[in-house]
Image (tube, coloured by chain):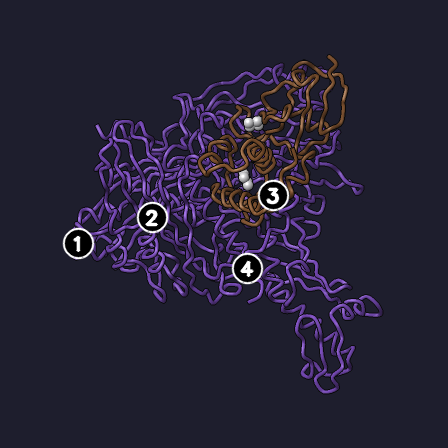
Chain colours: A brown, B purple
Amino acid sequence: MQISLVLNGKKITEEITPDLLLIDFLRNHGCYSVKRGCETSNCGLCTVFLDKKPVLSCSVLTARTDGHAIDTLEGLQDEAKEFGAFIADQGAEQCGFCNPGMIMNAIALFRENADPTDEEIKEYLAGNLCRCSGYEGQLRGIRAFLEYKRQGGASCRQ
Amino acid sequence: MQTVGQPIRKKDAEALVTGKPVFTDDLAMKDCLIVKLLRSPHANAMLKKIKTDTAKLVPGIEAIYTWEDVPKHRFTLAGQTYPEPSPYDRLILDRHVRYVGDPVAIVAGENEECVDRALKMIKAEYEVLPAVLDFHTAKDNEVLVHPEDNWKALCPVGADNQRNLCAEEESHAGDVDAVLAGCDVILEETYHVRAAQQTMMETFRTVCYKDAYGRLNVMSSSQIVYHVRRILSNALGISKSKIRVFKPRIGGGFGAKQTAVSEIYPAFVTWMTGKPSKIIFTREETQTASSPRHEMEITVKLGADSEGNIQAINMYTLSNTGAYGEHGPTTVGLSGHKSIPLYGSLKAHRFSYDVVYTNQMSAGAYRGYGATQGIFALESAVNELAERLHMDPVELRMKNMVREGQVMPAYYGETANSCALDRCLMRAAEMIGWKEKYPCRDMGDGKIRSVGIAMAMQGSCISSVDVGSATVKLNEDGSYMMSIAAADMGTGCDTILAQIAAESLECPVGNIAVSGADTDTSPYDSGSYASSTTYITGTAVRHACEQLREKICSQAARMLECGAEELEYDGNVAKDVKSGKTVTLEEIGVASMCNNVQALQVTESYSSPVSPPPFMAGAVEIELDKETGQVEILDYAAVVDCGTVVNPNLARVQTEGALAQGIGMALYENVQYTDKGKLLNNSLMQYKIPSRLDVGRLRVEFESSYEPTGPFGAKSIGEIVINTPAPAIAHAIANATGSKFRELPITSEKIAMGAR
Ligand code: FES
Ligand code: FES
C-alpha cells in the first residue's frame, strides 16, 4: 500500500507492507535515534511524536501514519542538545541507549507543562525505562534544565 | 589535582543525548544477511533428525547450518584470561541440546521475513531426555548434562562432567569447628538468590563482514574484544590474525557482555559465506538464552560470644551454572572471598562450594559477580545475629568490621591498605536517621515504616591476572591520542581514563582523544570487567603518560641542546633553566615528525598482584503495607569508599544505577521455570525492572580512603554498588514484619502471605 507522511518536516510518499511497524520504517529512513528495547511496549526507547504527541513507534503500524506528521530526535536536534546538556552535566546519559526515547518524552512534557513538579515528571516519564542511571541523575538534570528555563533560557520551540 | 576529582562531562555525551547513530545496529551495513537461531523447545534432548532442505528453498535464504556443519572442538563463551577457568563445554551448534533455548540451527537470509519463514520450515526431531531442573539434586545425578568425552576443563577447579560438577573447592583459616564450639551464640541459616537478569537496554548484537584482506571483522556490543577474538578463533578454528573485533558505543553491559553470547553465529555465517551478516537478539532471547546471575543457595553459620564479638564464619555455597559453565568456577568464589573479609574480628573461617550443571540457561557475569549473592547471605545473617544478641546491628558491625591495616585471611591474605568502611557505616546510619527510626514505626494507617542496613565490598581487578594497557602518542599540535581496549559501556571509562591521562600530562581533558576498543589497533587489555578499568587500565594510562612525558622532555632537551636535568617542563612549555630558552609542546610535536627516530608514542601494560577492595554501607527506609505486602522505597542512603573519586558525577550515577538494579533484584526481578524447564519471565512485561516510580530517593555520598597502589589513590566503583540493597531491604522488611525472608526476590505476595 502507498502512504504519504511528513517525517521531520519532509514529505515522504512510499509503498509499504501493511504490517510494517513504524519503528522499522523510521530506522529504514535513517532515524537511528529510534531504539528498540523490547517487544512488549514496556521500555519507551522507541518514543517518537505522531502529530506532536508522543507514541511508542514499536506499537504503531506505519500504515496508520498516512497523512500524519512524525518527528524523531533527528528533527529536534537543537532541543535535544539544549536539554541533553543538562543530563550530560549529571553524567546521567550513561550508555545513552535509552536517551532518545526519554528526551523525546521529556520534550513532550515540557511543551505540555512548562513547570512540572517532581511527581509530574516521574509520572510522565514512568514508561521510559533506564537500566544505567537509577533515574536520579535524569531527575537532577531535568530540574536544572527547568531552573535554567525559569532564569530565562531560550524557550522550547513549539 | 586539576582534572582527577572533577565532575567532567563524558566525551561521548553530545552524541548520546542527540541520538546519533553510534551503536552496533546503527552502524551495520544495509545489505547484511539477517541471522536468526532456531532454538530447542526441550530442556534436555538429542537431535535425532533435522531436515532443512525445504527451508533452504525459501527465496532469499543464503544458508542454514546445523550441528553437522560446525567444527567439533569445544570452547567456552566466557570472557576470561586464557586458560579460562570455565570448562570448554560448548559447540557452535550441538546435537545434544541442554536447555530450552539452546540453538539448534543458524538461518541466514536477505531479510527478516524469509528468515522467519525458513525457521518455521525446519523439521527437527528430538529424543527427549530427562532433565536436571532442580540444582539441589544436580550433583551426582544419574542424568548428566555433559556426558560427552570431549568436554574439558583447562584449570584445576574441581570440575567433573561425570558428576555434573562445574567446580568445587574448600578453603579455610583456623579451626572453624573448634572456634564455633566455643561460641555463646550460633546462627545458621540458608539464603537463596535467583538468576537475575542484567537487562541492559541494548540486547546482544553483532555485525560481521570480511575486509579487503579477507579477514573477519566483528563489530560487537562487547565488554571483551580481545577475549571475543580468542573465542572466535577457538570456535571457528582460524588464526587470531584473521580476526578483528571492535566495539562501537555499547547500550549497557553490567557483565552480560563479558560472555560472547551473540558473536559466534554471524561470525560463522560470514566466515562461511563471505557475506556481511548481523544478529540482533530479541528481548525474549536476551531473557531466555543469555548470561544472567548465577542462582546460589548459601548456608551461613556464624558464631559470636555473648558480647557480640563475631568469632567464626562457615559458609557453603551451592551455585547453579546452568547448561554451560561460563563464569561458573569463578563467580562462586566471590560469594565467600568477597563477603567474609568484611569482618576483621574472625578467629577462623571456612568457605566451601559446589557449582553444578543443570538443564537451565547458562549463567554468566552480572555486576557483583557472586559477591552480591554472598553479601546478601552474610549481611542478612549478621542482621539476624544482632537480633539474637539484642544488639543494634550498626553497633554489632562497628565492633566486628574490617579496619584499615588489617590482614584479610579470607581475601587471599591481602591487607586492607585503604579502608573507610567505619566512616561509611556511621555516615549511612546518620543519613537515614538510624537512631530515631530503627527498627520501625507503625504509621497507624495500615503502613509501617522501617529501616535496614548492610555493608559491602568488592575487588578492583583479578589480581595477578587482569592486564590493562594504553598507548599514548603526541600529535604535532600538542594534543594526544590515547588508545585502549577497555570497553566504555556507558560507564564513562573513556572519559575517566582521559582524566587520568590529562592529570599525568598536565593538560586539559579535551586534549586527549580516546579510541578503542579494537583488537587491530588497541594494545592488549583483558577487558572491562571485575571492576578493573579505573584501577588496572588507569594505572597503565598513568605509566604510559609518565613515560611519554620523559620522551617529550628528552626531545625538548635535544631541541634546546641542554641536558635533561637542566630542563623544566610544565606540560606545555619546556625551558632550559640555564639559557632561559624554551620550546612549546606544539614545537616538540612538530619536530617529532621531521627527521626524527624517537617515536613520541608509548605503550604500557599493567597488572596488579593485589586487588584492593572498595567498601560501602547502604541504609534504606521503606514503607510497608501490612495488608498487601507492598514495599515502597522511601529513602536509600549509600556511602562508598572507592578510594579517590576520579569523577564524582560518574561515580554517583554508577551508584544510583546499581542501587536501582539492587532494588529490583530484592523486590521483584524474578526468574521462574515451568516444570518442563521453560523460563516464564521472558519479556519486560514478565520481568519487571524498576521504573522511576519505584526507586524512591537515592542519596549517595563518598567517604574516601587513599589507595596507595591505585592511580591517584583510586580503587573501583562499578560493581560494589549493587551489593547492599538486597540485604538492607530484606532487613527493613524483617524489621517491619517480624518475619525473615531469606529468598530473593521478596515479592509483596510473599510478604502478605508470610505476614499472615
Ligand atoms: S521498543 Fe520497547 S516500548 Fe517500544
Ligand atoms: S543510560 Fe543506559 S539505559 Fe538509560
Q: Nearer the viewer, residue B353 or B193?
A: B193
Q: Which residue is mark 2?
A: B619
Q: Nearer the viewer, mark 3 or mark 2?
A: 3
Q: Quadrant of ligand 1?
A: top right
Mark 4 C-beta closer than 8 Å to ligand 2: no
Say which element carries label 2.
Answer: strand
The Cα atoms of the two marked residues, 2 and 1, are separated by 29 Å
Q: Which residue is mark 3?
A: A84
Question: Are both tags, 1 and 3, on one chain?
Answer: no
Q: Residue at x 15, y 53 (%)?
A: B184
Say which element carries label 3.
Answer: helix
The Cα atoms of the two marked residues, 4 and 1, are separated by 49 Å
Question: Are both tags, 3 and 2, on one chain?
Answer: no
Q: Could you say which quadrant of the image residue A61 lies in?
A: top right
Q: Which residue is mark 1?
A: B183
Q: Residue at x 49, y 61 (%)?
A: B714
Answer with mark 4 or mark 1, whichever residue precedes in sequence.
4
Q: Which residue is mark 4?
A: B6
The kind of residue on which mark 2 rests is Ala
The kind of residue on which mark 1 rests is Cys
Image: B731 above or below A19: below
Question: Are both tags, 2 and 4, on one chain?
Answer: yes
Residues tagged 1 and 3 counted as in contact (Cβ below 8 A): no
Image: B575 above or below B103: below
The local crowd at label 1, few if under 14, some if 14 to 19, many if 20 or more residues have their Cα within 10 Å, is some
Q: Residue at x 19, y 52 (%)?
A: B391
- Residue B364, position as x, y percentages in the image: 48, 39
Q: Chain of mark 1?
A: B
Q: Residue at x 26, y 53 (%)?
A: B394
The local crowd at label 2, few if under 14, some if 14 to 19, many if 20 or more residues have their Cα within 10 Å, is many
Q: Nearer the viewer, mark 2 or mark 1?
A: 2
- Residue B294, position as x, y percentages in the image: 42, 38
